[in-house]
Image: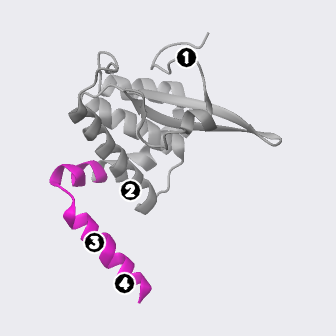
Amino acid sequence: MGYSKSAATSWGKFQRLSWRERRLLAQAFLLLPLCSLALRRSGFRRWQSALARLAPVDKPSSANHDETLLRRAQITARMVRAAAMHGFYHASCLPQSLVLWWLLRRQGIGSYLCIGARKNAARLDAHAWVEFAGVALNDSDDVRQRFTPFEYNIAPGKKFQ
């Protein structure tokens, strides 16, 4: 009984999505496992460069952003999160962030892919997220307090120094 109620709720939510949101959700369902596989096969730097070539953007949008672009970016992030949570493949933060970053580029929305780290007892935790105009799209607002971001822009094709 609980499963059918949950499925009905999910179906109802899906039906309320706009066509644009459904298209983004479908793209995220397909791209998340593909991205994870590509990261394993070719590595982060090579895969990010390939994605950047497929959807070039001049430069990330400035802090004087348009509210419409921010809203579109937030909707895209919500669809990627839904695909990761409810899809057949539950991707970690790096594939989710790369998929979000690429879908935004395809819409002409420049964003920043951020990677940070924190020390947790005896281990080092890493985390990836996407920001647009200083707003974390696929994480909470305090992500920069929880993880110290690396101080360089993770731009495709650039060498670390």
Residue linked to disc 3:
11
Residue at 42% in and 47% down = 32
Does the rendering let one see residue 75?
Answer: yes
* Residue of label 2: 82
Q: Is residue 26 above or below residue 39?
A: below
Left or right: where does residue 94 sit relative to residue 8? right
Q: Where residue 17 sits in the image (x, y, percent)?
A: 21, 59
Query: What amino acid type should be assigned to the residue bearing mark 4?
Result: Ser
**Pointer 1 residue:** 152
Q: Amino acid at mark 1?
A: Tyr
- Corner quadrant of residue 145: top right
Q: Earlier in the sequence, mark 2 or mark 1?
A: 2
Tell me residue 40's x, y (percent). 56, 39
Q: Are marks 1 and 3 in contact (CB under 8 Å)?
A: no
Location of mark 4 (residue):
4
Magenta-span inclusion, residue 7: yes
What are the residue bounds of the magenta stretch?
Answer: 1-25
Task: Give the spatial CA distance, label 1 vs label 3.
Answer: 42 Å
State how far apart marks 2 and 4 are (Cα).
19 Å
Q: Is residue 80 magenta?
A: no
Q: Secondary structure at mark 3?
A: helix
How many neighbours does mark 2 have within 10 angstroms: few (below 14), some (14-19), or many (20 or more)?
Answer: some
Q: CA distance from mark 3 to mark 4?
A: 10 Å
